[in-house]
Image (tube, grey):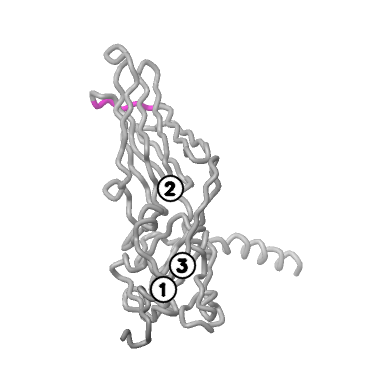
């Protein structure tokens, strides 16, 4: 009898991870390494360095010259360098990774006989064309957050940039995604659910009753809004999934300051404006 219960426990432990869903909090980098004449290079060393923290990821190209680096810290900038025996190193700088996306970067190495110096290639920060999307989604990074206007310093102010999102109660932070009720949305912070599980606030998130944001925008590095993800690890919502990650530490000291201002020139001298 004891052995039967033990067997059931072991099976439950093995099956449980298949039902556990977690939101993506990392990014990936992939690409290929070839010569400038199109020949595949197998065994080339690919080194990606996250410049703000100094974190280094290193892999080698496999068959077909392909390489993949997973579980990378979103954001950047990244410095990616490829080296191979008897070939000049190639670098690509100013690379930025979007949350949950795969940035594709290809390298073409020149022979040292024809090239005496290293080749440095800088890429644009915009990575939409080289990112592998996993369904209908919109990613908002620190660059967009710095430029988009916000009135209440609330993450929902930035959802105005999402075509499928609509604010239904602006003062309470409720948002409808893809036409669904806001309570059908899921709000994740670093992969952990942050919904209002008791259903007390109209916004559907923690802090809604106090009219405060569920998370300070100064703590957010970037976030994505997914509606119909292909990835099976994203789920438990029928509206939209708001997946936010917090900012990580760097080797440089930084801070942010903001203030609120309201006077008669902005609000008017009287309630009627006369």
Distance, label 1 to label 3, CA atoms, is 10 Å
Residue drawn at x 54%, y 74% is 206
- Residue contact at pointers 2 and 1, CB within 8 angstroms: no
The Cα–Cα distance between marks 2 and 3, rounded to whole angstroms, is 29 Å
Crowdedness near tag 3: few (<14), some (14–19) or many (≥20) residues, C-alpha within 10 Å: few
Q: Is residue 135 above or below residue 33?
A: below
Q: In terms of sequence position, does the residue under pointer 2 or pointer 3 come before the other?
A: 2
Could you say which quadrant of the image residue 69 lies in? top left
Residue at (47, 69) in percent of width and height: 187
Q: Give the number of the disc on residue 58.
A: none
Asked which quadrant contains residue 65, the reply is top left
For the C terminus, which image quadrant? Answer: bottom left
Q: Which residue is mark 1?
A: 263
Residue 108 lies in quadrant: top left
* Magenta stretch: dominant secondary structure: loop
Q: Is residue 31 left or right of residue 20?
A: left
List x then y, in percent, for residue 57. Answer: 49, 36
Local SS, label 2: strand
Q: Nearer the viewer, residue 66 or 80?
A: 80
N-terminal of the two: label 2 or label 1?
Answer: 2
Q: Residue at x 34, y 66 (%)?
A: 228
Q: Does residue 148 appear to the left or right of 203 in the view shown?
A: left
* Magenta residue span: 38-42
Residue 241 magenta: no
Given contact means CB atoms under 8 Å apart, are the residues at marks 2 and 3 in contact?
no
Say which mark, if any, is on residue 260. 3
């Amino acid at each position: 009898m004891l052995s039967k219960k033990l067997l059931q426990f072991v099976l439950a432990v093995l099956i449980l991870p298949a039902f556990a869903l977690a939101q993506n909090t990392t990014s990936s980098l992939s690409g290929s390494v070839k010569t400038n004449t199109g020949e595949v290079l197998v065994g080339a060393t690919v080194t990606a360095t996250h410049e703000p923290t100094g974190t280094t990821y290193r892999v080698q190209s496999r068959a077909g010259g392909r390489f993949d680096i997973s579980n990378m810290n979103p954001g950047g900038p990244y410095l990616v360098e490829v080296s191979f025996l008897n070939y000049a190193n190639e670098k690509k700088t100013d690379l930025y990774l979007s949350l949950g996306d795969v940035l594709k970067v290809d390298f073409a190495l020149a022979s040292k006989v024809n090239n005496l110096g290293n080749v440095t290639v800088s890429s644009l920060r915009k990575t939409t064309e080289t990112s592998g999307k996993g369904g209908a989604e919109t990613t908002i990074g620190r660059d967009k957050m710095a430029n988009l206007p916000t009135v209440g310093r609330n993450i929902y102010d930035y959802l105005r940039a999402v075509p499928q999102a609509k604010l239904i109660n602006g003062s309470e932070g409720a948002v409808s995604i893809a036409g669904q009720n806001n309570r059908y949305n899921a709000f994740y912070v670093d992969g952990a659910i942050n919904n209002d599980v008791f259903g007390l606030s109209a916004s559907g998130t923690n802090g809604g009753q106090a009219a405060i944001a569920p998370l300070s925008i100064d703590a957010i590095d970037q976030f994505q809004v997914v509606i119909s993800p292909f990835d099976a690890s994203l789920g438990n919502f029928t509206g939209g999934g708001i997946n936010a990650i917090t900012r990580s530490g760097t080797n440089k000291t930084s801070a942010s300051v903001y203030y609120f201002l309201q006077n008669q020139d902005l609000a008017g001298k009287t309630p009627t404006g006369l």
